Amino acid sequence: MLKTILNRLLQIIPTILVVVSITFVITRMIPGNPAATVLGPQASVEDVEKLTEELGLNDSLWDQYIRYLGNLFKGDFGTSYSYNMPVMNLIFSRLPNTLIIAFTSIVLAVLIGIPIGIVSAVKQYTAFDYISMVLALIGVSMPIFWLGLMLVLLFSVNLGWLPSLGMGSIEIGLWDVISHMVLPVGCLATIPTATFARITRSSMLEVINAEYIKSLRAGGLKERSVIYRHALKNALPPIVTVLGMQLASSFTGAILTETIFSWPGMGTLIVGAIENRDYMLIQGTVLFTALAFVFINLIVDIVYMMINPKVNYSGKGGA
Amino acid sequence: MTETLLQVNNLKTYLHLAGGVVKAVDGVSFNIEKGKTMGVVGESGSGKSMTASSIIRLLPPNTGKIESGNIIFDGRDVLSFTKKELLNFRGKDIAVIFQDPMSSLDPVFKVGDQMSEMICAHQNVSAEEARKIAVDSLRKVGIPNPENRMNSYPYELSGGMCQRVIIAMAICKNPKLVIADEPTTALDVTVQSQVLKLLKKMQKDLNTAILLITHNLGVVWEMCDTVMVMYAGKTIEYASAGELYSEPMHPYTWGLLDSMPKLSDYMKTKLTTIPGSPPDLRLTGKCCNFYNRCPYVQLICTKEVPQLMEIQKGHFVACHRQTFAERLERGGSNQ
């Protein structure tokens, strides 16, 4: 198992190298000069020229690429043009904001979605099953921007219960923080909750009709143990996959949700970086996201191995 | 004097499906004595497995329902069991061995953990004692290195090994009745006889009764004291194994026996078959289910359902042509 993990870690290097190269090339293909964007429309041609030179953007692409890679190896993600701050600092100043709503919404989605899926599968074709699956279908197909706006309309504008935008401040009180989180978290949790409910249901249904479940019941095990210990463990792999993907993508922040609720997270940082042609910031955030994805995938694979002894990525063993 | 362990009277189990009500079990009666073996034979879809599932009350959820009849186990009415009694019944009194051993064990738990869990669920022992009991029973069924095998996952075992593990799990319970639902069908021939021997040994050691469901008539003669023949959800003949073999009465049983390939048939190029196919189980219940395949059919067979009657002591048959007044002589089934 250790060998498998080490192997996977080594595989990460080429993946990341490809990601870095492609982002580098694509960001350079965006039309517009970062220096001009930074200085604004009133800037003189000389000033723009001067800044372009200072930022090293007049060097050949190849030189810029090598310099970027060299800095990366030293752990330097570069400096953002528009914020005039190290990219790393920017990411780490925004990341907690994103993660707090992302993780809360995923935890909510797991706690609500998975039990609903299990009960739907166990009580297949009952009213509970039909109602929850219709709701889940609505949940996965709901456009998130529309849902966000409707939530704001209902809870902030009409009812006036909750603030419509921004982050609360802990100095004002815990309730201020929580009340600002409710709408973005609710908005972010909708799709994952529905996805978990659907995937858990279908995965459980496949398992519940298996012969060994019948054997366990015939052996006189309690229904609780049959469902939650045996069936659920067998049904976990697809659920873990989805969970891994949700977690990984939560690092990029939810661009739509953060924009609607003016939440100062990763999503708004990335959108801003693209608008400002902030090459270093774009590259940095994409690289960071890619790293988050590969490491979470690795963790998902390790969890797989723990759930199902038959899964063995080294290619040895298995049936 | 033998004692009756399980008594099933006129059991009816229907499946309520979207396409109609399927009378999967439609009037099945038999007794099993303590320590004896009863065989159930019949073609696929004749209700053998549904009968077994009805006894442990493990029917397909939502669709399967026991409509009438009663099941008396050791003097207790199985159909009136509470949830808790039912779990105890399944966990202590009865063990079930299913057809495909490879898919009967939970693939993501170690063999030892599964066995210990079952033991702990119904016996008042510590986890450590449970493991000891499990190792002992694995040794009894002839698994080499039982201590090591406890840590194997089911996929690391062969089909025969898995079936031994399942039999070992049954032995742990010290059950009064073992229901073996085609225990050898999925195994290859050399392993089949080992598994059957194992079942017999278990029966001798624990004085367990066995309900053996099988397609294989050879297995029946070898293993069983009594035999029930099922057709389209009904018991059509029920007798001691010896009598059923020497003096079968139902034309369907004749057909079954004739279809058995014998060594002396090596000159024949074709196997004997029963022409036609079993009726649609949604439409049965108005006549003899076998009439359209029976060479001895008469008008009454198409109009009335034959009742199961004890024609000779211990020999029951359900056929209009086999009554106290009339006896059919067995001829070739292809008349």
Image (spheres, coloured by chain):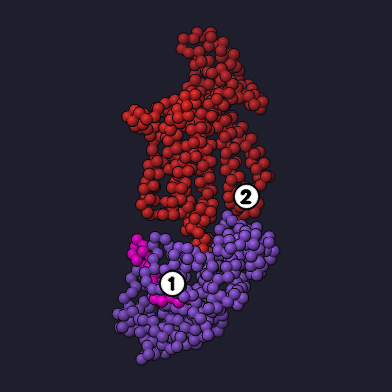
Chain colours: A red, B purple
Q: Is residue A232 above or below residue B269?
A: above
Rendering coords of residue A216 (x, y %): 52, 61
Viewer-proximal residue among A91 and A226? A226
Rendering coords of residue A201 (x, y %): 45, 50
Crowdedness near tag 2: few (<14), some (14–19) or many (≥20) residues, C-alpha within 10 Å: some
Crowdedness near tag 1: few (<14), some (14–19) or many (≥20) residues, C-alpha within 10 Å: few
Is residue B226 left or right of B189 when viewed as pictured?
A: left
| Residue lying at the far right of the rendered structure | B145
Q: Amino acid at mark 2?
A: Asn
The residue shown at (58%, 61%) is B120
Residue bearing mark 1: B77
Q: Is residue A283 above or below residue B95?
A: above
Viewer-proximal residue among B281 and B138? B138
User: Which labelled disc corresponds to residue A312?
Assistant: 2
Is residue B101 left or right of B323 when viewed as pictured?
A: right
Please tell me whether mark 1 sits on a helix, a strand or a loop. strand
User: Which labelled disc corresponds to residue B16?
Assistant: none
The residue shown at (38%, 78%) is B290
> Can residue B73 be seen at all in this image of the molecule?
yes
Please tell me whether mark 2 sits on a helix, a strand or a loop. loop
The residue shown at (37%, 69%) is B67
Rendering coords of residue A23 (x, y %): 55, 28
The residue shown at (35%, 81%) is B306
- Residue B18 magenta-highlighted: yes
Q: Is residue B209 above or below residue A147?
A: below
Q: Amino acid at mark 1?
A: Asp
| Residue lying at the far bottom of the rendered structure | B325
Q: Do pointers 1 and 2 mark residues of a single chain? A: no
Q: CA distance from mark 1 to mark 2?
A: 49 Å
- Residue B81 magenta-highlighted: no
Magenta range? B6-22
